[in-house]
Each structure stands twice: as C-alpha cells, then as structure tokens.
Amino acid sequence: MWNKVALCSVCKHSPHPASLLLLRLPPVTHAFKRTCLGPSSDRQWAQRAQNGPRGALPGCLGSSKAKRRRCAQMYPLLDGRVLPVHRHVFEENVRNSEAVIKRYSELLQVVSKGGGEDAVLRHTQRNKKLFVRERLKLLLDEESFLELSPLAGLSMPYGDVPAAGCLTGIGKICGIWCVFVANDATVKGGTIYPIGVKKQLRAQEIALQNRLVAVYLVDSGGAFLPLQSELFPDKLHGGRIFYNEAIISAMKIPQVAVVCGSCVAGGAYVPTMAEEAVIVDKIGTLFLAGPPLVRAATGEYVSPEELGGATLHSSVSGCSDHFASSEKEAYECVRNIISTLNYEPVPEELVEHDHPLYSPDELLGLAPRDYSCTLPVKLVLSRLLDGSRFQEFKADYGTTLVTGFGHVEGHLVGVVANNGELSHDAALKGSHFVQLCSHRGIPILFFQNTAPHAAEPTSISQAEAQANRLKAQASMMAAVACAAVPKITIVIGGCFGSESYAMCGRSFSPNFLFLWPNARVALVDSRHLSMVPQAGDNDCTDESELKHLKQKLEAESSAFYSSARLWDDGVVLPQNTRKNMQNSNSTLSKEMRKRRHTWLKTRQE
Ligand code: COA
C-alpha cells in the first residue's frame, strides 16, 4: 500500500505526479458504468487504440528511448472488452470487491490509531514524543511511500498488535530508496511481539535482497516478556535482527538508527550495531537494564537520563554518534547522514509510456469472488500493461497459463499469469518462459490465481497424465526458484496448494508478494470440501465435523488473515496494482542492473 507523506523538512522534492495516484486508501470509485462494453464503448475503445498513446511524454523520435517506445508500440493490442456473456460474473465480482475493500478500509482505520487514543495521548502529551506516523513525515521525502504489511499482528492468538507494533516500509530519503523500521511505542511501549520480530526480519530481508539502505527509529521496551519463549531462543527469533545487522553491514549496505524513545535490553543493540546513530535529548535512552532493575540490584536511585540518556551516550559511552536536541533535528540529521553515503539518488526515469486503454477501476470486476468467477486473465493484463500491448509467448500452447512481455510505465517485464489449471503443457511453457526471462535479465511479474484442486483421476491414463503434470510443475518450480531476476507476485485470486509454488508463492522468495483483497490463501478451498480427510480410506463425512472444518478453513483463507500473519507484503487494491508494480520494480532496478551486469560478464567469459 502506498502512503502519502505530507511534509519533509530537508531536501523537499516536488511530488512526482504519478506518485499522487496512489494516495492511501483512495475511495472505492463507483465507475463501473462501463462494466460491459456495448457498441458505443466499442467505438470508444477502437478510437483510443487508433489514436495511440495517452499520457505519453514528449520525446525526440530519434532517441533510443523513443525507439524503445516505438518497439513497445508494435506489440499486439490486447482486446480487453468484457463480453456481455461475462456481465453477470463481472458484476458479482464488483459487489464482492466493494465489500472486501470496505472491510480492508475498516482494518486500516484500526491500525492507523496505533495502540489507541489513550496510548497516543500518553505518548505525545506525557512522554513528549511524536507519533510514529508523524516521525515518518519528517524523515521521508515528500512523496508516497510503500508501507509493508500494515495489517500484520491483527487477531493474533495473543490478541491484537496493531501493525505488529512497528511500521516498516520503503520510501525515499533525499531521493534514495530506503527501508525503514519504526517502533510504535503506543503499542505496549513498543515491545516486540513474535509477529513484530517477523516483520522486522522481513524488512531486513528486503534491505539485503535489494541492497537498500536501512533506517531504524527505535522506541521499544525490548521483548514482550510474557511471550519470551516465542521471541528469544530460536534461529529466527529476536537475536536474528542483530545477526542481520551484522550481515547487512558486511555487505556494505548502510544502516542508520535514531534513538527516539526507550531502547531497553535487546532494543539497545539495534542502534549500537548501526553504522551511525542519532540520539534525541530528553526522550532517547539506551540501556540493557533500566532504573528499576538498577534499584533492585544495587539499591541506587538513578534517572533514565543519567543512566543512558543522550548526553551520556554522545559524550561518555560513544554509543551514539550524533546528539539531537529535538526529534525534528534528529530526522534532519538522518537526512544529512543519507546525503553523505555517496549514493546517487534514483534518477527520476521519466520513461515514455502509454497508459492502458481500459480503466483500472474495472479490475474490481475481474478480481474473482471465488475461482469459479474467474474471467480470462488477458482482461486483467489489458488494464495493467502500457498501451494494453502484449507480446505473447507460445500463445496457442498450454493456454491455461499466459506468458509474454509487456511494459509497466515504460519498463520491460515478463508476465506469467494463471488462466486456468496449471496443466502439463502450461507448466512446461511456464518453465521455458521463466528461464528465458532469467537469461535476458528481465524482471518477472506473476499474476497468481491458482486452482483450488486438481480433478481426481478416474482411470490409469488420467493418473499417468497427472504424474506427467507433476513432473512439468516440478520443472517450473525449479525454473522459478533458480531465476536470478527480480520477481514480483500479485495474488489476484486463489493461492491454493502446490501450484502456488510454481507461481512464485512466498516460499519461493519473490522480491515482493502482494494480494488483492479478494484473494484466498489455503492448501484447499473450504468451498470445495465435501468430507473431512482422514488416514486410510476412512474419510469422515460427519456433518458437524465437516461444517467446523469448513468454517475454520474459510476464516483462515482470507487475504486479511494472510496479511496479519505476514505471509505476504500487504494487500494492494486492484486499481492501484499498476503503480504498486512500477514502484516495487523501481526499488529493485539497482539490484537488477547489477545482476544483469554479472550475467553479461559471465556470457562474455
Ligand atoms: N513486556 C511486557 N509488557 C510491557 C513491557 C515488557 N517488557 N514493557 C512495557 N510493557 C507494557 C506495560 O505493562 C504497559 O501495559 P498497559 O498499557 O497494559 O498497562 C505498556 O507496555 C506501556 O508501558 P508504560 O510503562 O505504561 O509506558 P511508558 O511509556 O511509561 O514506558 C517503557 C515504556 C518501555 C520505557 C517502560 O514500560 C519500561 O521500561 N518497560 C520495561 C522494559 C524492560 O525492562 N524490558 C526488558 C525486556 S528483556
């Protein structure tokens, strides 16, 4: 989800017009009048196609960019018209999309309030600190940023932990893409819950995978003690955050921290392991054990400021490299630090491109309510790719998977999109195409809508066909796992069973994985369950047990359940998908260029 930062204090950049498209939670438009195109809309569509690009930037025809654009314009046009025969399904999907987006808005509202009004008041009035979202406004450039997994932590077995107690995301500071991790002290003093650890580790993984600068705003009471056994001992528990800091540092990826609240126990290592740390006077404190423990151990009364405040750490211990007299000064200091990294800001690549010929709002009617409401995936692609143009690969083979090349805001991408069950031929085609993108250094977009179940074989020949399909799917999984190019997965419908692995599910490490709010994530679809599977041939058909299992599966397969558990990087609204893909892609471009360079070098050797 792309949020909008209202203000920044240093290096003010005028917002890129395109970035304004993705303001947080744009109201669900009701522009579905054009849902199914009648004759007049046909004319309109044909006229648009004839008129050529909309929104193209003026450019010199002789430039290589213009030539690239001319090539892209030669790609065949996708026919994105929704046929009258699909009208019923389309409208059903729209109704469902509106309902799930409403629910999504409600959940975001809850999350935006952090630990609740009282906690925010205590934090801002009594503790004289800025709310975490205000801090980000001062830290980041004045343009939209990508907040990762805002729903993480909702309805956990141990209760609601809004935004998992820390905000993470990707935004620009002085024009440089950075990953941020910012504790929200209004949620139980910013203490770290198991889901908070997972969220911080994911943010660090993104920094590592994409070589992005990491910025930590630390305001945390350390481990949430009642859950210490789920936080402390294991490999991917709290200590991993410090381990990652060391590895990120060894990879020469800069890390900067601000101590803008309490940094107790584990929290104290985050700033001390960062390359540079800033501490804020009066509100920033850093110690392994706080004043109550000192009193218990030695009987000595000591104030937090004396024990580990800004003056002590800036002039005695040296744990902090910069003393800031206010929060505002601290974030200005971070921006100055970023400008000393000797990183080139991301060039504002205004690549000439065409907009899709069809409204992205119509994607709400193409977001399947369930698998049986799936419409041809090319209708989706025609609303996401530049100029609705697509150079299809193996168009007539394995047609339940659509593969080919297109552009997103001028950037070449490979597209792999489910268009039915992942058959033997479709999987072979998928592995061929993925390898091809990998060889050419082209990022891949996976549009996942996997089928909930494969039909049971009823004959030997069908069983053989299934075995062959299995082999082809395994080959596609291997190709996807080994493709050394950026991969972004958008779950536009179902994320079911093993086919989801071949479509670059979470365990196949896509650089980013986002879900549409209608998405369903589960091993099996509850709606297709007719009995409770048990050992041997004794499948249970007990009605109440089946009902119970179906309800459980239903609740556990929603996009919000998935996002709360960090099985993805967040929910993206269908109409915002194009911008989201473009921005995710541009954060990756640096790493991509590097990988491409390595690949070209290997070819030359
Ligand atoms: N584990 C579990 N809960 C904790 C906690 C911890 N480590 N630290 C704070 N909390 C809870 C408090 O019980 C309180 O809960 P409540 O709102 O239900 O009453 C809430 O977090 C806010 O704490 P509070 O002390 O009221 O807020 P504060 O802003 O005045 O102070 C801290 C925040 C973090 C500075 C302070 O609570 C503190 O020093 N906590 C102890 C930290 C510690 O020793 N950690 C060791 C971890 S190994």
Image: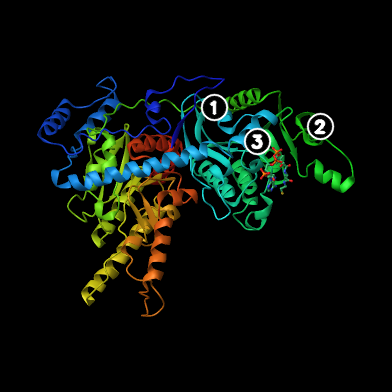
Mark 3 CB within 8 Å of ligand 1: no
Residue 137 shows which numbered tag? Answer: 1
Examine the rendering and report whether any part of residue 211 can be seen: no
Name the amino acid, label 3.
Glu
Name the amino acid, label 2.
Val
Q: For the point 62% across and 38% down, which residue is it?
A: 186
**View extreme (right): residue:** 299
- When the figure is inspected, residue 360 is found, relative to residue 222, above or below; the finding is above
The residue carrying pointer 3 sits among few (fewer than 14), some (14 to 19) or many (20 or more) residues within 10 Å by Cα, namely some
Looking at the rendering, which quadrant does residue 36 occupy?
top left
Q: Nearer the viewer, residue 371 or 505?
A: 371
The reply to whether dot 2 and dot 1 touch (C-beta < 8 Å) is: no
Q: Quadrant of the N terminus?
A: top left
Q: Is residue 300 left or right of residue 448?
A: right
Single out the mark in the foreground, 2 or 3: 2
Helix, strand or loop for disc 1 = helix
- When the figure is inspected, residue 324 is found, relative to residue 547, above or below; the finding is above
Single out the mark in the foreground, 2 or 1: 1
The residue carrying pointer 2 sits among few (fewer than 14), some (14 to 19) or many (20 or more) residues within 10 Å by Cα, namely few
Q: For the point 60% across and 26% down, which residue is it?
A: 340
**What residue would you read off at disc 2?**
316
**What residue would you read off at disc 3?**
275
> What separation in Å lies between label 2 and label 3 (alpha carbons)?
18 Å
Q: Assign ligand 1 to one image quadrant.
A: top right
Helix, strand or loop for disc 2 = helix
Instruction: From the top left corner, tell me how far across and down residue 563 is, in percent.
Output: 46, 48
Looking at the rendering, which quadrant does residue 420 occupy?
bottom left
